[in-house]
Image (cartoon, rainbow, N blue to C red):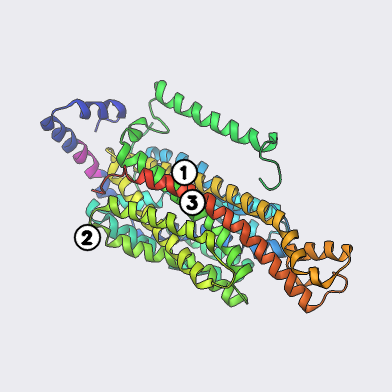
Amino acid sequence: MDHNKSGAEHIDAMKSATSSDQNILLKHANNANEEIVQHLQTTREESIVMCHNTYLFTLLMPPAILTFINADLGPDPRYTRITISWNLGGAMFVTIGGRLSDIFGRRYFFIAGACLLIVGSIVSATGQSINRMIAGGAIFGAGSGFLEMSFGAVQEIVPSKYSHVTIDLFDASSIIAQVMPLISWRICYYVMIAFQPLNLVMLCFFYHPPAFKLGGSLYPWVSATTLAPLIIGLLTLAGIVVYENYTTLQESLYPPRLFRAKRHFTTPMVVMAIGGMQYYSNTTLWQRLSRLLYAGDEVFKGLFASVLPLGTIIGGIIVAFSKYIGHQRWQVLFAVALQTACVGTMSTATIDNSAQSIVLTCIISVTTSVNLLNGMILVGFGIVYQEDIGTAAGLAGTSRLLAGAVATAIFSNVTNNKYGSSLSVAVLSNVSRYNLPTDALTKLVAAARANTAAAYQAVPGITPAIRAAATLGNKQAYLEGAHLSYQVALAFGLLGVICAFFYSECG
């Protein structure tokens, strides 16, 4: 393949060629890619599996232990930024790393990501404040953004016909990371300190790919603090689109040729982004909802935290048979529609029916995996040049992570704002029969918000009955906030269903 030739010119030539000419061009591209593939097949898969697990450690663990971190180091209303900073860091680095690794090779980007995760593990494990934990989350995101490219790397070393099974086995390998929420929060980070260097060693010794070529809760929505970053970010994105499309670049960071494959790349990327909104926001919302409403002790808190990882594993198993079932387009459409229906139904969750919430949340996780994993496979099929696979995987990851960060911020603010406005009403209504003085009621509402034994003990005249009534009011108020968030998520899900109609088949 002539690497000096513009990718856009190559795509345009293929579009304008006759059927016979297209076959010649495709054969030429395939022959050129064969040498790359043969080199990649000498890579040890274990090193990529380790990358995937270390990436998932930082993804799954913080949302599962957020409430413990906030209870220990807070309370601080900014604690959800621990996970939001991860999404934002990953969204920024996965696309940049994906494209640059296509040019210079993935080895040193993976190694850099592994080093960042070691630093993030140390920062988080020794964190004594929410601010420091947010910083640790941002470092995790930056490192995980590089390791997110493992999805693209693993598809490079197997033939396309085995992509579904490979992605499933790759996803199943994450079982180690999936069970980590079952242990205490600081131990989670200490285990990562031990695990991350092992990943670094595996990468240094066994991963040697080629370089393909050279060359709202704190600030009002209408405030400047909220609007300025949003507007600047949108204008920056618009500027990048204009710059990439209308300037002559030897190596484009976001190759326009990828986006021309609308049904093979752009549509899956949008559908995955909406799936990411549902999944990443739900990892935060479900953990707090389950712990507050349903989990009675530490063991059950860990088990409830494993509902989402269980769904992820089941979804991966389904994708393994996706190719044999056929009609991947309709599989994705059904998954997105079922996910949306379950998200809408979660807006009717009740305090006394944990089984319904568990089943619905598990199904949401299953369908999200079917959507995201099939999307990653289709993105791999949709590229023309083998050396674009890192860029394609990076862009797909960025869309998912960035949308997830936005959704987590939106849903957290929606939940917290509704919870804040409902808490006093619910608590005061439940304890009205006890005729408590005003100062005691004020402290009781604050104690219900903190939801700790120490806070309740500080309330004058507190009794077990009064505490039970206030605790129930706290649950009722948070449930109202969660209901509203699920209703907002339903709107995004419906948009995903519409986009999924324009999916192409995986193959």
Residue 119 location, x and y as percent? 60, 54
Q: Which mark is residue 490?
A: 3
Disc 1 versus disc 2: nearer the observer: 2
Residue visible at 47% across and 60% down in the picture: 199
**Alpha carbons under labels 1 and 2: distance apart:** 29 Å
Left or right of 347 on screen, residue 414: right
Using the rendered view, name the quadrant where residue 436 is placed.
bottom right
Image side of residue 29 versus residue 55, left or right: left
| First of labels 3, 1 by sequence position | 1
Which stretch appears magenta? 29-35
Percent from the top left, x then y, of residue 218? 71, 46
Give the overall secondary structure of the magenta segment. Answer: helix
Percent position (x, y) of residue 45?
34, 59
**SS class of the residue under badge 1?**
helix
Reply yes or no: does residue 34 show up in magenta: yes
Q: Name the amino acid, label 1.
A: Thr
Check disc 3: other Cα within 10 Å, few if <14, some if 14-19, many if 20+: many
Magenta run includes residue 425: no
Between the residue at mark 2 and the residue at mark 3, the CA separation in whole angstroms equals: 31 Å
N-terminal label among 1 and 2: 2
Q: Secondary structure at mark 2?
A: helix
Please give the residue where the numbered disc 1 appears in the rendered image.
398
Assign a secondary structure to mark 3: helix
The residue pinned by badge 2 equals 324
**Left or right: 294 with respect to 390?**
right
In this rendered view, identify the residue nearer to me: 198 or 338. 338
Mark 2 or mark 3: whose residue is earlier in sequence: 2
Q: Which amino acid type corresponds to the residue marked 2 in the rendered image?
A: Tyr
Q: Residue furthest top?
A: 247
